[in-house]
Structures are given as structure tokens and as C-alpha cells.
Amino acid sequence: MELSSVGLPRDPRFFQRLGERAGIHVVMGAGFYKEGWLSPVARSMGADALTEVILCELNEGIDGTGLRRNYR
């Protein structure tokens, strides 16, 4: 499991390649860190907007990559 959440540097394509080469499924974290570690943008968002970001990553892909939960 890879636990970098929204707002931290993450590389979904790296974990995709790693999983393919190792023959494993890599699960990336979703969500936001606690208040002290939130970006200014995340701090300005309400709970509904934060939830929407997480749902978008689950349904459409992480950081705009199209990589998302495999529902097989």
C-alpha cells in the first residue's frame, strides 16, 4: 500500500509499473492529511468539495492519469 494522499508528491505511473513488474496490486491511498499538513487549497475547501476530490480519484483516476480502482 502506498499512502501518499492528495496534495503530496505522488507518482501513480511509477506504482503502476512497479505493480506490473512485480506481479502485485499496488493500492494508493485516498484522502487528505490532518489540518496541519493540508495545502492552502485543501484548507479552503469544505467537506463536500474534499469528498468530491476523493470520489473523482476513485471513479476517474488519480491526479488526472486515468489510473483508478480496478473493479474486476
Image (cartoon, helix red, strand yellow):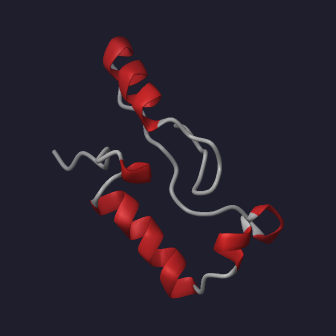
User: Where does the image place residue 44, in percent across and percent down from the top left?
Assistant: 68, 81
Instruction: Describe residue 40's horizontal placement relative to residue 11 as left or right.
Output: right
Instruction: Describe residue 59's horizontal placement relative to residue 36 as left or right.
Output: left
Q: Residue at x 45, y 66 (%)?
A: 54
Q: Is residue 25 above or below residue 63?
A: above
Determine the residue located farthest toward the top in the rendered image. Answer: 21
User: Where does the image place residue 68, in percent across and percent down from the top left?
Assistant: 31, 49
Q: Is residue 18 above or below residue 70?
A: above
Q: Is residue 28 above or below residue 31?
A: above
Q: Nearer the viewer, residue 35 or 13?
A: 13
Instruction: Describe residue 30's horizontal placement relative to residue 41 as left or right.
Output: left
Q: Is residue 55 above or below residue 57?
A: below
Q: Nearer the viewer, residue 32 or 1?
A: 32
Picture quadrant of residue 38 = bottom right
Q: Residue at x 45, y 26 (%)?
A: 14
Q: Quadrant where the C terminus lies?
A: top left
User: Where does the image place residue 17, in percent across and percent down from the top left?
Assistant: 37, 21
Q: Residue at x 39, y 59 (%)?
A: 57
